[in-house]
Amino acid sequence: MEDGVLPSTSWYGISSNLVLYLTSELQESLVHAAETYYNFGGLSSLLSLLGAFIADSYTGHYRAIVYSSFIYILGLVTLTMSAGFAPIHYRKLCFYMSLYVVVLGQAGFRPCVQAFAADQFNEESDKERKAKNSFFNWWFFGVMGGASSAAIIVSYIQQAVSWWVGFLIVAVFMVLAFIVFIAGKRLYRMHIPGGSPWTSILQVFVAAARKRHFSSMDASQRVYAGVEVALPGTTSLSHTNQYTFLDKATIIDETDESSEVRNPWRLCTVTQVEEVKMLIRVIPVWFSTLMFFVVIIQPASFFVKQSATMNRQILFLKLTPVAFVVSVGLFAIISVPLYDWGFVPLARRITSNPSGITLLQRIGTGLLVSVFNMLVAALVEAKRLRVAREYGLADQPNAEIPMTVMWLLPQCVLIGVSDIFGVVGTHQFFYEQVPDGMKSLGSAVFLLATGIGSFLGQVVVSMVAKLFPEWLTNNLNSSRLDNFYWVLAGLSLVWFCIFLLVSKNYVYKGTAATPH
């Protein structure tokens, strides 16, 4: 688990305080800092597709993690140097260059590390297969533990001691993770790359197009089942009744019968076609989760800025703005054992489902909670603005409003609840519902959702800033951030309805032929 916890500490050590660093040290505007934050996460997630493709096709998970870790560490070291030693007039340039080296390292690391960990479970063992169902929950537990540590320790050092010392600690965490990871090499089950999966996928579309003149499949037509599977490491799959136009790729016509060798660009196996169907099925689900990822990244952007304006004295402690938002991670950590040991056994008795509820039900619950989260956030922000006006502090951006930061606790708790349902559910869904030979791609699809969510968040922020410039200004006390939250709540509700329509017709991998 350490090879997941320590890198997450490094990742969140940068991202959790990024908006504050950009606005306070590099003198960026709030809108530009938020856009940079969204771009940082978004680009890393988009490039993860490339990292996943290389890992699944050529290097395998282990070597991809090793290679990308070197790049990741290089980026963290140069980031530290830019914050502490770069000349002031070059500091911004050096920081951004280092930041995108980190992004490049993350692109190879993030889609592979969880897939590699999941590879260590033997699917042929009932005991290990059952343990794998809980693996994603406890993986999330470890990641959030690292994130919480970063928010509490690293962010405090960055503001109380020095930013470059904080970044140095982040780099050290990553070096330690790398050492722990390579030390266990002899104990690992290694993923064997099977070449590019895209060739097999393209063959299905080409073969189906070449036989488009055939009518829908019926019992009188000969179908090529084949003895080989499409992707190395996969098992044979049964036929399903969705996207039947692709089934034409399995029809044996006269040309196929007269040929001594099967032409894979004319004739494909049923398993090969079903693997393509799997990928098509997850696309609508993926799309319907995008707004959810816009909502869950709010704690590290605007929630932090809100807490910076409020009374953060808790008993004898004066919390940093980021430290309070760590309650999101802490509640998510608490929720993991509650979910795994409490909710799942209870739900299992009702539904007879080994996982308690289905993956889509779990994701849907997370999406619905995220809608309520934005409603609560909007109401709390409206309250904060009223207090600022009542005490004549609306025109004082650096003034502390006499309102305890504990008012932000409900929205942080709701984010934590939506994480345990939505984030873990989507991660497990995309890992399990893709072909066995494309597990890194499954993790990358999850990261792509987070990345597009980040870019979508940037689009929303940019449009709001352009249409309603008074909503998001550098002075949060005179802005209307509550209106921005209302917009997110409305968009989240629309996306939740889309999810309900999509999930109604979804066919799970390895289940019956018709949607359910």
Image: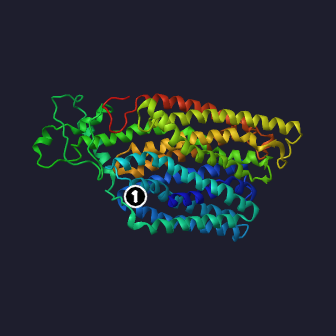
Q: Is residue 85 above or below residue 159?
A: below
The percent coordinates of residue 364 (x first, y second) are: 51, 34
Q: Is residue 457 above or below residue 217?
A: below
- Image point (38%, 39%), residue name: 280
Q: Residues within 10 Å of mark 1 (few under 14, many from 20)?
A: many
Q: Secondary structure at mark 1?
A: helix
- Image point (74%, 45%), residue name: 306
The percent coordinates of residue 156 (x first, y second) are: 72, 59
Image quadrant holding the C terminus, namely top left
Q: Is residue 451 visible?
A: yes
User: How many labels, in total?
Assistant: 1
The percent coordinates of residue 143 (x first, y second) are: 55, 53
The percent coordinates of residue 419 (x first, y second) are: 57, 42
Q: With 485 as the anchor, is 274 left or right in this view?
A: left
Q: With 430 as the anchor, is 312 left or right in this view?
A: right
Q: With 291 as the anchor, is 250 left or right in this view?
A: left
Report the front residue among 404 and 245.
Answer: 404
Q: Is residue 94 above or below residue 374?
A: below
Image quadrant of residue 146? bottom right
Residue at the outermost right position: 392
Residue kind at label 1, given as amino acid type: Ala
Report the front residue among 275 and 150.
Answer: 150
Q: Is residue 459 visible?
A: no
Which residue corresponds to mark 1?
A: 55
Image quadrant of residue 409? top right
